[in-house]
């Protein structure tokens, strides 16, 4: 199944939560059962569920966002592992406001640039190979700048520190082998 088919399709409850809920709501889990794996620099890692439903993820928040003064919901990015679906390192960026239909988001990590497809207020790589390439660049970088066009108004530009990202990724990879 293609990435866009996975995102748009009906997912298991934990997977749907990983893609659609805020990190706080996701951390609460169906019965408040998410467990912190620790805080690593700018990131916090969690596990949710067990057995076939186990999901591991880390969440980061931007250190800077523009334009200033624009009301946006939760802005963050996360990487999710879902072993039962053989998914590892699936990235999602939430911009906190509906994005322009048909637009792409852009990530800049050092000299590397990546295009992400958008739906509603979030953006994803088009496939697992894209996630893998982005994660490799993230692990070598200092910051990532995520840029997207909202349905109305000036572009959103969110800058994330990458301090602690590698350790957060190692934590979720270990917890969800």
Image: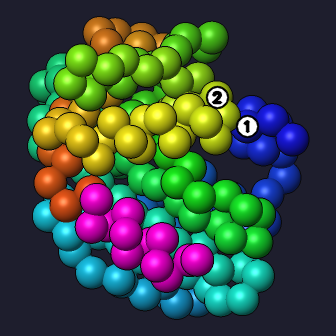
On screen, 148 above or below 81?
A: above
Q: Quadrant of residue 136?
A: top left
The circle drawn on residue 126 is 2
In reply to whether residue 170 is colored magenta, the answer given is yes
Residue drawn at x 29%, y 9% as measured from the top left? 154
Dot 1: within a 10 Å radius of its alpha carbon, few (fewer than 14), some, or many (20 or more) residues? some
Marks 1 and 2, the one that precedes in the sequence: 1
Question: How far from the left and from the top, in percent, is residue 75?
Answer: 33, 43
- The magenta stretch is 166-177
Which element carries disc 2, helix, strand or loop? loop
Q: Is residue 43 above or below residue 96?
A: below
Magenta-drawn stretch, dominant element (helix, strand or loop) = helix
> In the drawing, does residue 81 fall left or right of residue 57?
right
> Is residue 53 or residue 65 the one in the foreground?
53
The residue under the point 43% across, 21% down is: 114
For residue 29, say whether it is visible.
Answer: no
């Amino acid at each position: 199944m293609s990435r866009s088919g996975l995102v748009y399709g009906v997912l298991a409850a934990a997977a749907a939560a990983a893609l659609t809920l805020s990190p706080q709501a996701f951390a609460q889990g169906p019965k408040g059962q998410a467990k912190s794996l620790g805080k690593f620099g700018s990131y916090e890692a969690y596990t949710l569920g067990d057995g076939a439903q186990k999901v591991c993820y880390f969440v980061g928040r931007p250190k800077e966002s523009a334009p200033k003064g624009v009301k946006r919901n939760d802005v963050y990015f996360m990487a999710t592992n879902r072993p039962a679906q053989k998914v590892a390192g699936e990235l999602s960026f939430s911009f906190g406001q509906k994005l322009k239909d048909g637009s792409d988001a852009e990530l800049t990590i050092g000299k590397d640039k990546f295009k992400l497809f958008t739906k509603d207020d979030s953006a994803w790589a088009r496939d697992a190979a894209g996630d893998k390439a982005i994660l490799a660049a993230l692990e070598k970088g200092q910051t990532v700048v995520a840029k997207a066009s909202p349905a109305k108004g000036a572009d959103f530009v969110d800058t994330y520190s990458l301090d602690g990202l590698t350790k957060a990724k190692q934590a979720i990879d270990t917890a969800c082998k």
